[in-house]
Image (cartoon, rainbow, N blue to C red):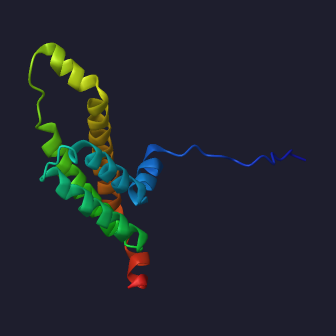
């Protein structure tokens, strides 16, 4: 009689599973909106401050069971912010640039750009590969 292994088989989640979970979550657009507000509210800059209300609306859509559409909106606006934020260059002497890059604002800017890049990949993937069967039944 063969012995049977009764231990449950656990599988390690793949990177695609993590990306899909990130893209379906309401947390990433809220996190990016918080970083953008921290960077551009004081001194107030009008153009970057257009992004937080749209990202918070995307969170509202996600919580209202429109997860695929919310992922598309988050990916689009995160990509636009990433594009605009990457065009900014530090000016001044080498020491001043290094101080700006590795200061508190530099770390927050890097985190915002990292979250925006993650949103573009994860939320864009969810939007492209997502199925809307569950969303149609809610309407």
**8 on left or right of 30:** right
Name the residue at the front extreme: 43
Decide if residue 28 is on the left or right side of residue 3: left
> Is 76 or 7 nearer to us in this picture?
76
Q: Quadrant of the C terminus?
A: bottom left
Query: Between 35 and 132, which is closer to the camera in this rendering?
Result: 35
Where residue 76 sits in the image (x, y, percent)? 21, 57
Front-lying residue, 81 or 50: 50
Residue 60 in the image: above or below residue 90:
below
Residue 73 lies, with reference to residue 102, above or below; the image says: below
Where on the picture, by quarter, is residue 123? bottom left
Q: Residue at x 20, y 44 (%)?
A: 82
Q: Position of residue 62 (x, y in %)?
A: 39, 67
For image coordinates 36% across by 69% down, the residue present is: 60
Residue 67: x and y in percent read 38, 67
User: In the image, what residue occupies the spot 74% across and 49% down?
Assistant: 8
Count of marks, rendered view: 0
Residue 128 placement: quadrant: bottom left
Q: Position of residue 4 (x, y in %)?
A: 83, 47
Q: Is residue 99 above or below residue 7?
A: above
Work out which residue is located at the far right of the displayed protein and give it: 1
């Amino acid at each position: 009689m063969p012995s049977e292994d009764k231990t449950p088989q656990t599988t390690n989640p793949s990177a695609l599973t993590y990306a899909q979970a990130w893209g379906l979550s309401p947390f990433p657009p809220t996190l990016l909106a918080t970083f953008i507000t921290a960077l551009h509210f004081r001194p107030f800059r009008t153009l970057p401050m257009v992004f937080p209300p749209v990202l918070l609306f995307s969170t509202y859509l996600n919580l209202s069971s429109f997860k695929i559409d919310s992922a598309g909106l988050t990916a689009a606006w995160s990509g636009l912010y990433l594009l605009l934020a990457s065009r900014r260059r530090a000016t001044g002497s080498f020491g001043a640039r290094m101080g700006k890059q590795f200061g508190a604002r530099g770390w927050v800017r890097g985190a915002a750009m990292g979250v925006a890049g993650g949103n573009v990949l994860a939320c864009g993937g969810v939007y492209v590969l997502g199925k809307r069967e569950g969303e149609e039944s809610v309407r």
